[in-house]
C-alpha cells in the first residue's frame, strides 16, 4: 500500500492511542483520586468541627445545670430561713426576701441560657448526623475511585499494547516518504496529520474547500493536502 488508503486508519489508531495515553497520565497523576481524597478529608474535618462544637455546648450545658442547681439550693435555704421563724428581725427578713428575689431572677436568666444551649445541641446533633452520612459516602467514593483507577490503568495498558501492534502493521504498509510526512504533520498539528474530506469539508480544520480547489485535488496526482491547514486529505 503506497497511497493514502491506510493513512486514515492509521490516524484513527494514533488518535485512539493519544487519548488512552492522556487518560493514563491523568490517572497516574491521580487527579480523580486526589479530588476524592480531598472531599473525604473535608467531610471528616466537618464532622470533627461539629463534634468539637457539640462538646463545647455540652460543657456549657453542664456548667449551667450545676449553676441552676446551686442557685436552687441557695434559694431553698433562704426561703427556709424566711418562713421557719428562726429570723424575727424585720430588716433581716426584708433582706432575705430581696436575696430570694435576686436568686430567682438570676436562676431565670440562666435557665434561658440553658434553653439556648439545648437548642444549639439539638441543631448540632442533626448536623452531625447529616455530616457523618456525607463523610461515609465520601469515604466509599474514595475507596471506589482508588480501585476503579487501578483497574482502568490495567485495561489501558492492555489496550495500548494491542493498539501498538495494530499501528506497527498499518505503518509498515504505508510508503515511507508518505509516513514521514504524516509523522511530521502530526507533530505540528496537535496529533492530527491526516484528515478525511467529507462533503468538501476538511475534518482536520473543519474548513470547506472551494469547488475549484476540490476539482483541482480530484485531478491532481500524488498526496492531496488541505489548502487551509495543509494536513493530508483522504477522500471518503
Image: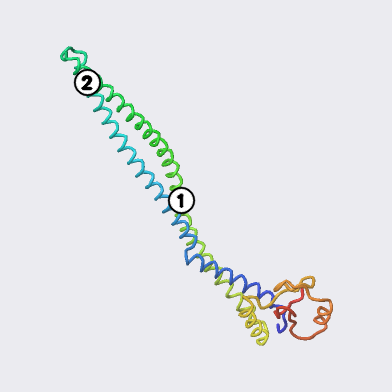
Residue at image x 46%, y 46%?
134
Instruction: Indicate left or right for 126 with 18 as reference.
Output: left
Q: Nearer the viewer, mark 2 or mark 1?
A: 2
Quadrant in which the N terminus is drawn: bottom right
Nearest to the observer: residue 154 or residue 111: 111
Image height of 85 relative to 67, above or below: above
Closer to the chain start, of discs 2 and 1, is 2
Kindly check if marks 2 and 1 are in contact, taking CB atoms under 8 A apart as contact: no
Question: How far apart are labels 2 and 1 at the CA level?
Answer: 63 Å
Q: Provide residue 95's location: percent of width, then percent of height.
A: 22, 21
Q: Secondary structure at mark 2?
A: helix
Query: Pointer 1: what residue?
Result: 138
- Give the image quarter of residue 215: bottom right
Query: Pointer 2: what residue?
Result: 95
Residue at image x 15%, y 14%?
86
Quadrant in which the C terminus is drawn: bottom right
Amino acid at each position: 500500500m503506497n497511497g493514502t488508503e491506510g493513512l486514515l486508519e492509521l490516524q484513527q489508531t494514533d488518535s485512539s492511542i493519544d487519548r488512552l495515553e492522556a487518560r493514563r497520565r491523568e490517572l497516574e497523576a491521580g487527579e480523580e483520586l486526589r479530588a476524592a481524597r480531598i472531599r473525604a478529608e473535608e467531610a471528616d474535618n466537618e464532622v470533627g468541627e461539629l463534634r468539637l462544637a457539640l462538646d463545647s455546648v455540652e460543657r456549657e450545658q453542664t456548667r449551667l445545670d450545676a449553676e441552676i442547681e446551686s442557685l436552687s439550693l441557695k434559694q431553698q435555704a433562704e426561703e427556709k430561713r424566711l418562713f421557719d421563724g428562726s429570723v424575727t428581725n424585720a430588716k433581716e427578713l426584708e433582706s432575705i426576701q430581696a436575696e430570694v428575689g435576686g436568686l430567682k431572677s438570676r436562676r431565670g436568666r440562666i435557665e434561658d441560657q440553658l434553653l439556648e444551649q439545648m437548642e444549639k445541641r439539638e441543631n448540632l446533633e442533626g448536623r452531625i448526623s447529616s455530616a457523618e452520612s456525607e463523610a461515609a459516602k465520601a469515604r466509599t467514593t474514595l475507596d471506589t475511585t482508588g480501585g476503579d483507577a487501578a483497574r482502568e490503568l490495567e485495561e489501558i495498558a492492555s489496550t495500548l499494547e494491542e493498539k501498538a501492534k495494530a499501528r506497527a502493521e498499518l505503518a509498515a504498509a504505508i510508503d515511507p516518504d508518505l509516513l514521514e510526512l504524516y509523522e511530521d504533520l502530526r507533530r505540528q498539528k496537535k496529533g492530527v496529520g491526516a484528515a478525511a474530506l467529507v462533503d468538501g469539508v476538511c475534518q482536520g480544520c473543519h474548513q470547506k474547500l472551494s469547488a475549484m480547489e476540490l476539482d483541482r485535488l480530484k485531478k491532481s496526482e500524488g498526496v492531496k493536502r488541505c489548502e487551509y491547514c495543509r494536513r493530508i486529505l483522504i477522500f471518503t
